Amino acid sequence: MKNPSEPTSEAVSANPILLGKRADELSWLIEQQCGPVFEANGIVVPVRSCSLLLHLEQARCASAADLARALDQSHQLVLQKIPALIARGLIARQRDPEDRRRRIFSLTPEGHVQVALIAKQAVAIASIYQELYAEIGVDLFDALGRAIEVLKRRNLSERLATIK
C-alpha cells in the first residue's frame, strides 16, 4: 500500500522546481514521436541533429566551435553528434586550409538530400504544431523563446535574490 504522505506523481510533476524536467519530457516526447515520421519519410538524421544539418546548409561549412556558437549548444554536445552524422554519410570532415589543426564540416550530397527531406516534412509538422498551439492556447515555440531570452537577461539566481 502506498504511503499517503508520499507525494503523488502529479504533485511532484507540478512542483515548479521541476520546470526543466517538464521541458525535457516534452523534448523527449517530440523526439520519440518524430522518429517514426522521419523514418516513414526517408529521413535518417537523428531528430536532435536536425539543427546542426540545417545550419551547415546555410553556412556551407563550419568548425565544431562555430556550430556550437551558432546553435547555442556546448562544444562537447556538438562533438558528440558529429560521428553519427559522418557515419551516416551526411557530413564530411576536412582540415581547414588556413589552420591545419582545425577541422571543418560540410554537408555531403546525401546530407543535402536529407536537409531537403527535413524541409519538406517541416511544413507538415508546422501545421501540426499550429493545431497543438491552438489546442493548448499558447504558441510554445514563441513562449519558450521568450522564456529563454528573459532568463538570459536576468537569471534565476538574480530573481531569487530579490525575494529573499
Image: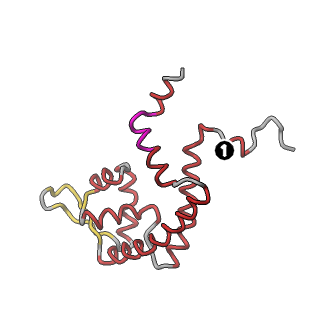
Residue 160, placed above or below residue 53: above
Query: In the picture, which quadrant includes the C terminus?
Result: top right
Q: Left or right: 94 with respect to 87?
A: left
Q: Quadrant of residue 109?
A: bottom left
- What amino acid type should be assigned to the residue bearing mark 1? Ser
Q: Main secondary structure of the magenta part?
A: helix
User: What is the magenta range?
Assistant: 148-155
Q: In the displayed structure, would residue 26 be above or below residue 37?
A: above
Residue under label 1, please give it. Answer: 13
- The percent position of residue 2, horizontal first and vertical second, equals 84, 43
Q: In which quarter of the image is residue 30?
A: bottom right
Q: Which residue lies furthest to the top in this view?
A: 164
**Is residue 46 on the magenta stretch?**
no
User: Would you say residue 151 sits in the magenta stretch?
Assistant: yes
At 40% from the left and 66% from the top, the residue drawn is 84
Q: Dividing the image into 4 quarters, which one contains the N terminus? A: top right
Q: Which residue is at a point 31% across and 53% down the rendered structure image?
A: 70
